[in-house]
Structure formats: structure tokens, C-alpha cells
Image: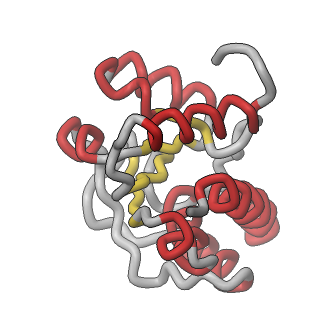
Amino acid sequence: MKGGSFAERQTAAFSTLYKKGFTMDKLIFLCTGNTCRSPMAEGFFRALGGEEKTGLSADSAGLYTSDGLPASENAVTAAGELGADISAHRSKALTPELAREAKYLVCMTGSQYDNLCAALPDCADKVFTLAPGDISDPFGGDLEIYRKAASEIKAAVESIIGRLAK
């Protein structure tokens, strides 16, 4: 990732894409298994009015997952405590087609960013990370670990909504 602060790079990239006339229709949050971090991000985006404020629909997917898995119990609880209901979530794997249809692909870690750009170089201009630092994977952790991740994710999603608001 190149020079400038994280917020400056992210805002400039989103603004450039918007000015080029891209139809802003879908933002996909990505993590490893699509059962913890990315469903929470999707849920917070919706709960915070991100779809209305940005004109983007939210979705989520996993880089290494199977379709149809529920969100982890602790993710449902932690997200719910902060206002996002993800109880009906079911995982899905990111496919090349899904990636190409999205306007933005938002990863939880720098390594996910790097791996996705390498795997789908034609999508690299729309791949970003949710926050300047990695959002740690809470998978398998206790509820406190999930609460910490949920809090970090919610704050980062609020920031993205603020930058993308119409």
C-alpha cells in the first residue's frame, strides 16, 4: 500500500472511483471464513444506515469458506450488543464473479488484501482494508475477544460510511 495516511489513501481511492462514474452499488466485506468479522461489518454497515447514506448495498463473503455456515454464536452476541442483528447470516465464498460485480472489496487484514490482489489482479483497484491495522480474527475466542473485534469493526465501518456518504 502506497504513501499518505490510511484515511487519505482510502478517501482518495473512493473519490476517484466515484468521479470516474462508477455506479456505486455493492460493497463486500471480506474475511477468512465469513462467520465472524465480515458478517459483523456487513451488519454494522446496515445498522448504521450505511446503505442509505452511501447508496451502496452491503454484502459479505469469505476467502476460504464453505457456503451456508451460520455466524458464530459469539459474533451474533457481540454484534447484537452493539446494535447489529446478524443472526440470519449464512456464509458464502467469494467467487471471481462476485468480486468483479462489486464496486468495493473490503478486507480485514493486509495479508487478505495482498492475497486477493494477487488472486484477482483485475479487481485490485477496488480492494481496500477496513482499517489501517489488521482486525484480529476472533474465531474460537471467548465473548470478550469477540466484543473487542466488534467494537473495532463498528468504529471502522462508521469511518467508511462517513467517507462514502453522499
| Image quadrant where one finds the C terminus | bottom right
- Of all residues shown, which one is farthest toward the left? 97
Residue at left offset 25%, top offset 59%: 67
Q: Nearer the viewer, residue 2 or 23?
A: 23
- Seen in the picture, residue 21 relative to 163 is either above or below; the reply is above
- Seen in the picture, residue 66 relative to 166 is either above or below; the reply is above
Residue at left offset 66%, top offset 59%: 157
Q: Nearer the viewer, residue 25 or 86?
A: 25
Residue 141 can be seen in this image: no
Image coords of residue 95 (percent x, y): 23, 41
Residue at left offset 34%, top offset 48%: 65
Q: How many marks?
A: 0
Q: Nearer the viewer, residue 139 or 42?
A: 42
Residue at left offset 70%, top offset 45%: 135
Residue 26 can be seen in this image: yes
Q: Is residue 40 left or right of residue 97?
A: right
| Image quadrant where one finds the N terminus | top right
Image coords of residue 127 (percent x, y): 47, 33
Image coords of residue 62 (percent x, y): 39, 48
Please, which colouring scheme is shown? secondary structure
Image coords of residue 139 (percent x, y): 60, 55
Residue 105 position by quadrant = top left
